[in-house]
Amino acid sequence: MPNWFNKKFQVNIWQVGGVLALAILLGLGLGAKYPNLTQLGKKSTAPDFSSLTSLYDTLQSKYDGTLDPAKVLDGARSGLVAAAGDPYTTYLTSQAAKDLNDSLSGTLSGIGIEVGIKNNLLTVIAPVDGTPASKAGLQAGDVIASIDGVDTSSLTLDDAVAKIRGPKGTQVKLVIIRGSNAPMTLTITRDEITVPSVKSSTKPSNIGYIQITEFGTDTGDLVQQAAAKFQTAGISKIIIDLRDNPGGYLDQAVEVASQFLPKGEVVVSQRRGSTVLETEHSDGGDLNNAKIVVLINSGSASASEILAGALHDNGRAQLIGETSFGKGSVQEVEELGGGAELKVTVAHWYTPNGVNINKQGIKPDQTVPLTQADSDAGRDPQLDAALKALQ
């Protein structure tokens, strides 16, 4: 496990082989940089765990079935951690930890599509070029009626994503409805999918556009590359789209902020109680004089909020959209052996102006809603407002 101060988790997206679905998973990581953290915590008397042994002995002797010792231990660990009452302090089984690490690395196993709910139907937003989904002929707008024989109307978005995802080399059978055509069945073999966390383009009026879907291991480098291209092209007005970006690694958020801030400006600080643990500063970047609009919504969390807060509090960006998620706690990730991990809240982070937005979120300077009717009609009033603000 690397030093998690430099590889920090926040709320994350399930990027399932290219299938995107929001799933609140992790908070920010600190790692071993603060060896004195335990000294800052409250001392407590350890509970008597002998009752758990007694409970297990009773279960084992009375239960009409077979107990899996590994599952029993995972259940006990999960329950112990859940008793803290903090949604961001969690026990991750070895598989859950692997899935999360794979997601943030940008390389996953699946078929390579982005899906969402449109008109209450599971719909393909877009296939990723060169992936099994693209090669099989899936198109944007296709409705996925069933997955391996299971009607998708009975599934949540997360459930559907989980069923489409799977190990490389295995197959998934999808029934697709395209327009008024008869349903067709596609059997697609899963493969490893690499999905970049950053997309950039140029909008009308020579406005640069950077969409960050999560803060993965490649995000800082990809934004730096986009910034260099914009600078070469003489682009000085930029939209940073953080909508539905639930976070990722903090060091990547700091790197991105540095592209748009002068050297030395505060990006974020972490505190435990009244104790300041660390303050992150900008390294300075190529676009620290550009005019910036940041798009946020209720799906923008953790690293997204850190970036939005840093640019806003330093007077570098106008925020447009809807109030962000409100994830202001800091987590440390510890290996427990066998691939399992503990994610535990150890601190809270604060914007440059000293604001912790936990459960409150960051309010935009200009509130612009995006309704389901807008999405169904292909409208994006939030992006339109950002373009207008820069024009």
Image (cartoon, rainbow, N blue to C red):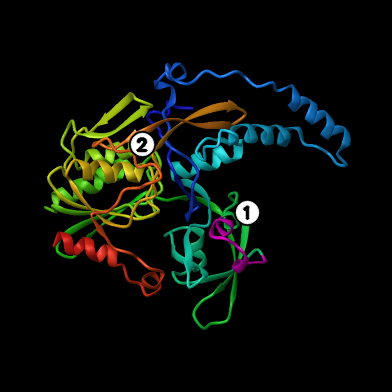
Looking at the rendered structure, the number of numbered marks drawn on it comes to 2
Residue 165 is drawn in which quadrant? Answer: bottom right
Find the residue positioned furthest to the bottom: 180
Residue that numbered label 2 is attached to: 250
Where residue 207 appears, as percent x and y from the top left, is 18, 59
Where residue 130 appears, as percent x and y from the top left, is 44, 58
Q: Residue 157: within the magenta?
A: yes
Query: Which residues lie in the magenta part?
Result: 149-161
Residue nearest the viewer, comparing 143 with 298: 298
Answer with left or right where residue 360 lies relative to residue 235: right
Numbered tag placed on residue 170 in the rendering: 1
Q: Secondary structure at mark 2?
A: helix
Residue 91 is drawn in which quadrant? Answer: top right
The residue drawn where x is 37% and y is 75% is 377
Answer with left or right where residue 285 lies relative to residue 214: left
Tell me which amino acid carries mark 1: Thr
Specify the principal SS of the magenta part.
helix
The residue drawn where x is 77% and y is 25% is 53
Is label 1 or label 2 in front? 2
